[in-house]
Amino acid sequence: MDVTVTLDENLLGKRQAEWAHWLAHPQENPLLPDDSGQLNGAGSTIQNELCVYSQLQPQHSEGLLHSGIIVTRRPCASVFDLTSAEVSGVHALLAEVRAHLDATVRPDGYTVGWNVFPAGGAHIPHVHLHVIPRWNTDASAGAGLRYFLKAAVAASERRPENEAAAPALPASEVLS
């Protein structure tokens, strides 16, 4: 599999600016469910008393059809801030979401993950668990989250030193 990873040295700065906006204007946060449990730009939802799953509309899924997010009803910056009850609620809802996706779109696998804080890829300060169904026919079938992170490190090593955004581990240590 040949995957090109484009590195953007300004991405962390963009994420930090986005967080600053959402922190200054929490009422605009698109990841906070409204009173009916709906998220802005969301399609179908599955809910429990502590969290909401919203399947993203195609225009918001960035090519990851049938993907969605689980968010807590309580505003919370990261997975590390969840209460024990919220952790249980997210896990229970994840099982319901899997059953729903298995029955409706029959994926061959899943990528499930959290982005935490701007450096970790979160651009809105509200905890959300990505649920991405995957198929054997996907262009990136077989590649998990770490594959893309390792590819980015390897690509950064190939750039001239004056272009490197941050020190990187040698590819031999990362890609093994």
Image: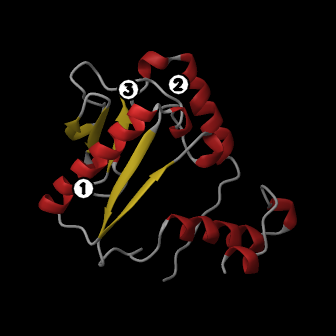
- Residue on which disc 3 sits: 32
The tag earlier along the polypeptide, 2 or 3, is 2
Front: mark 1 or 3: 1
Pointer 1 or 3: first along the chain: 3
Q: Residues within 10 Å of mark 3 (few under 14, many from 20)?
A: many
Give the residue displayed 51% in from the left and 34% down from the top: 124
Applied colour scheme = secondary structure
Q: What amino acid is at disc 2?
A: Trp
Amino acid carrying mark 1 in the image: Arg
Please indicate whether residue 102 sits to the left or right of residue 82 in the image: left
Q: Residue at 29% of width from left, 35% of height from top?
A: 52
* Left or right of 165, for residue 23: left
Location of residue 114 in the rendering, given as x and y in whole percent from the top left corner: 49, 48
Q: Are marks 2 and 3 in contact (CB under 8 Å)?
A: no
Residue 164, quarter of picture:
bottom right
Residue reaching furthest right?
A: 162
Name above or below for residue 21 compared with residue 123: above
Label 2 belongs to which residue?
22
- Mark 1 falls on what kind of element? helix
Which residue is under mark 1?
98
**Residue 37 lies in what quarter of the image?**
top left
